[in-house]
Amino acid sequence: MERHPTEDVALLRLSIKGQIWGMLRLDERRLSPEREVEVLGYPEETFYERLRSDGKAPYHPQIVNTRAYIRRLVDNTDHRMRGGGESFYELSQLAGDGCSGAPTIAYDAPGSKTYKVIGIYKGQRQMTSSRGITSSVGYATRSEMFAGWCPAILGRTLVQEANPPDAVEPIVFGPADFVDSPHPPHDGASISRG
C-alpha cells in the first residue's frame, strides 16, 4: 500500500491473473460548480434494511446511486477534514455513512458506456446554524489532484493505469437484459469484450 503525499488517497496493489477492464475511467479535469455527478456506493443503512432477526444480513450487492451537484471547490484550509486531504468538491447531497471511498462520477455523454471518475467520496458534514437551520453536504477528493500521481509500487501514473489505451469498451447490461433471470444483477453490470 502507498499513500498519496497530500490527498486522502491510497493505492493497494492486487495480483490478479489476466486483464480486467471496468467501466470506470479516471478524469484529470477540474469540474466547475453546478455540474451534475453521482456517487456509486453502499451506504451503511442498506445493511440495516436487510438485517434479519438472527442478526445477519444476506449478501446484497445492489449499488446505490446518489445524484448531486458540485456546489463549490474547497480546500482543507477552509474546512478541517478528518483524515486529511487538501482538495475537494463540495456536493449538494449526502451519499451516506459507509460510502467513504466510493467513486464519484460524471457522464460525458448520454448513453456513454464508461464513467469518468471525478473524485473519491470522502464523507459528509451536517451543521445547524444559530438560527436552527440545518445544512448537509458531501465531499469528494478531486481526481485532478491525484490522477498524475506516480506511486512507486505502480511505476506509472494513476491516469495511465486507469485509462489504458488498449482497454476494450465494456458491454453494459441493463435490467431489461435480465427479465427472465431469477437473480438479475444491479443496473450497470458489465463484462468486457475481448
Image (spheres, helix red, strand yellow):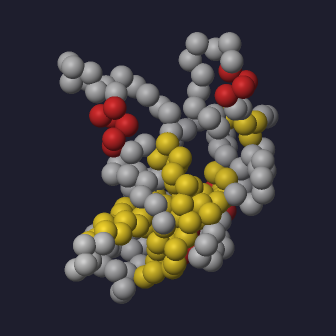
Image label count: 0
Q: Is residue 80 left or right of residue 36?
A: left
| Residue for point 74% across, 40% down | 170
Relative to 14, does residue 58 appear above or below in the rendering? Answer: above
Furthest residue to the front?
131
Mark yes or no: residue 141 visible.
no
User: Could you say where residue 51 lies in the image, as x and y percent from the top left?
Assistant: 28, 27
User: Could you say where residue 98 lies in the image, as x and y percent from the top left?
Assistant: 35, 49
Relative to 162, does residue 89 appear above or below in the rendering? Answer: below
Relative to 175, does residue 6 appear above or below in the rendering? Answer: below
User: Could you say where residue 19 lies in the image, as x and y percent from the top left?
Assistant: 66, 40
Front residue of 84/173: it is 173
User: Could you say where residue 96 lies in the image, as x and y percent from the top left?
Assistant: 38, 52
Q: Is residue 113 left or right of residue 146?
A: right
| Residue for point 64% across, 60% down | 106
Mark yes or no: residue 185 visible.
yes
Front residue of 154/146: it is 146
| Residue for point 67% across, 28% down | 175
Picture quarter with the N terminus: bottom left
| Residue for point 34% across, 32% down | 49
Picture quarter with the C terminus: top right
Where, by quadrant of the figure, is residue 83 drawn? bottom left
Relative to 138, does residue 53 appear above or below in the rendering? Answer: above
